[in-house]
Image (spheres, rainbow, N blue to C red):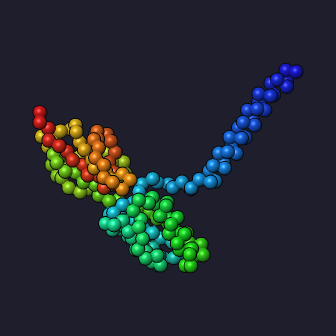
């Protein structure tokens, strides 16, 4: 009798795990494929689009102010707000519609759009973004703080959901392409 008592909890656990696995695998197959990056493209980003085995289709393009690019067979289309993975999927789908049987499209970011630092820094201006950039590194690229700079109350204007939003950052916070950073003057 003890054997059956010990096996029943294990059997229930096994059935429960199987059920969870079935539910989870069904969810994954119904979900949209994950992209490798969540970075959304924007005006000024330089991208490379290529189709495997089709050298004439390799193009380096810069997203226009409107967030569009022009690509062979497809003409001009909006890429702003899309991730690299989403753009690959869109181009692949559109090239399959009468142009290629099974295009293998690859999209990569060649150069991110600039971010800008203004206010109480020694060399304000636009700077090339690099992944892993923090506010402290961004200020260093702008020549460092002036003597009158406030190291608190640093604001950044960042586009979120298609609208510019202002927020305060600390020196360890991340900076993103297109950010506009303003270093205010300290009054004390």
Is residue 128 among what the camera can see? no
**Left or right: residue 50 compared with residue 19:** left
Instruction: State which quarter of the image contains the C terminus.
Output: top left
Q: Position of residue 50 (x, y in %)?
A: 48, 70
Residue drawn at (65%, 45%), measured in percent from left and top?
24
Looking at the image, the residue that sits furthest to the top is: 2
Residue nearest the observer in this picture, 88 or 12: 12
**Left or right: residue 27 compared with residue 82:** right
Q: How many marks?
A: 0
Residue nearest the observer in this picture, 133 or 101: 101
Residue drawn at (78%, 32%), measured in percent from left and top?
11
> Does residue 109 lie above or below 166 as drawn?
below
Q: Position of residue 93 (x, y in %)?
A: 54, 69
Residue nearest the observer in this picture, 47 or 17: 17
**Left or right: residue 34 compared with residue 30:** left
Q: Position of residue 137 (x, y in %)?
A: 28, 46
Residue drawn at (46%, 54%), measured in percent from left and top?
37
Residue nearest the observer in this picture, 99 or 50: 99
Q: Position of residue 52 (x, y in %)?
A: 53, 71
Residue drawn at (75%, 37%), measured in percent from left and top?
15
> Does residue 164 lie above or below 95 as drawn?
above
Is residue 186 among what the camera can see? yes
Instruction: State which quarter of the image contains the N terminus.
Output: top right
């Amino acid at each position: 009798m003890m054997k059956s008592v010990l096996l029943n909890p294990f059997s229930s656990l096994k059935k429960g795990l199987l059920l969870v696995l079935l539910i989870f695998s069904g969810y994954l197959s119904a979900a949209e494929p994950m992209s490798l990056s969540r970075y959304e493209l924007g005006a000024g980003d330089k991208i490379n689009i290529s189709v495997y085995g089709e050298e004439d289709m390799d193009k380096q393009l810069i997203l226009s102010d409107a967030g569009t690019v022009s690509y062979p067979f497809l003409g001009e289309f909006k890429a702003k707000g899309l991730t690299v993975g989403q753009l690959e999927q869109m181009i692949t789908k559109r090239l399959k519609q009468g142009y290629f049987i099974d295009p293998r499209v690859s999209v990569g970011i060649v150069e991110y759009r600039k971010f800008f630092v203004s206010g109480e820094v020694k060399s304000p201006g636009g700077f090339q973004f690099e992944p892993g950039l923090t506010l402290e590194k961004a200020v260093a690229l702008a020549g460092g703080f002036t003597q009158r700079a406030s190291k608190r109350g640093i604001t950044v204007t960042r586009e979120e959901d298609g609208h510019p939003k202002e927020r305060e950052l600390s020196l360890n916070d991340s900076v993103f392409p297109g950010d506009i950073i303003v270093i205010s003057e300290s009054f004390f």
